[in-house]
Image (spheres, helix red, strand yellow):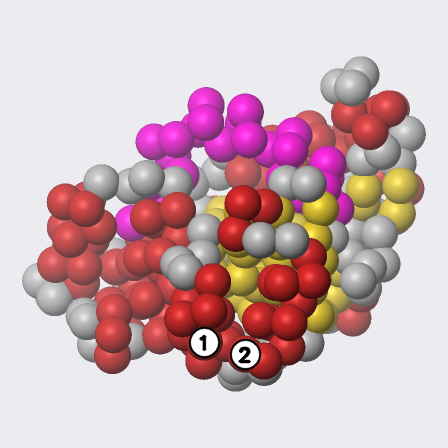
Amino acid sequence: MAGHSKWANIQHRKGKQDKLRSKMFSKLAKEITVAAKMGMPDPDMNPRLRLAVKAAKAVSMPKDVIDRAIKKSQMGDGADYTEIRYEGYGVNGIAIIVEAMTDNVNRTASNVRSYFSKAGGNLGTTGSVAHSFDRVGEISYPASVGDADTVLMAALEAGADDVESDEDGHWIYCSVEALNDVSDALEKALGESTESKLIWKAQSLTEVDLDTAQKLMRLIDLLEEDDDVQTVTHNFDIPEYVAAQL
């Protein structure tokens, strides 16, 4: 059950996500366009596109924006994007994985390296921190869907590997290959999920103090504000008493 960080991975990001809503929509639209371009433009026939559309709906992205992003993939114009992963360390050796989608690898690499440097961290080589994470599917549900035992039973019957629950909701984990099947089975048992996606799940979390948390949050903010960066994952946890001071 280890690995889910209530404060570091969810709560303190909500205000930031709300403030950067338009930027978030832009990044989601890019993922939808790329997913549709790489496969079928029909979410039912394209698992990656299906996940991208679900993620967009989870943050109330308008349907017409989603449809435009899919249509753009079929128009034969626009930039060709390269997907690239960066790995590095924040202060105190905190592991960080950055996933980007860019039309200029040199620009993105330079920017990401500068963000790590400005925030007291350093960019590593590919594979330098990924060994501290597992690549898994994550399906989330609100707490209102049921109690922990109910969700656990439904998840196990659906073929999931693990479940984490608290007062804010439920997070169900499965293998990458099983994500769509598990998501479909859970939808029949529990209703539509809040979100289904592939993530890097930290194998263990490191609690940080206020000073370290502030420096790490600065790095994450710099990374997330970059238009080329799609996701930022880390292995630190902010205790509630520290989160209250942020």
Q: Which residues are magenta?
A: 5-29
Q: Residue at x 80, y 45 (%)?
A: 236
* Residue sitting at the far left: 75
Task: Rate crowding at label 1 as few (under 14), some (14 to 19) or many (20 or more) other CA atoms within 10 Å.
Answer: some
Q: List x then y, in percent, for residue 50.
A: 32, 66
Residue 94 versus residue 171 in the image, above or below:
above
Q: Residue at x 54, y 79 (%)?
A: 158
Which residue corresponds to mark 1?
185
Identify the element where label 2 is drawn: helix
Query: Position of 10 compared to 78: left or right?
Result: right
Q: List x then y, in percent, for residue 148.
A: 68, 57
Q: Any mark on residue 158, and which? A: 2
Q: Residue at x 19, y 46 (%)?
A: 63
**Contact, CB < 8 Å: mark 2 with mark 1?**
yes
Q: Amino acid at mark 1?
A: Ala
Q: Residue at x 70, y 31 (%)?
A: 217
Q: Of callouts 2 and 1, which one flags the residue occurring earlier in the amino acid sequence?
A: 2
Query: Position of 42 compared to 242: left or right?
Result: left
Q: Is residue 233 located in the magenta-colored stretch of the structure?
A: no
Query: Position of 202 compared to 43: left or right?
Result: right
Identify the element where label 1 is drawn: helix
Q: Is residue 26 located in the magenta-colored stretch of the structure?
A: yes
Q: CA distance from mark 2 to mark 1?
A: 5 Å
Report the predominant secondary structure element of the magenta stretch. helix
Q: Amino acid at mark 2?
A: Ala
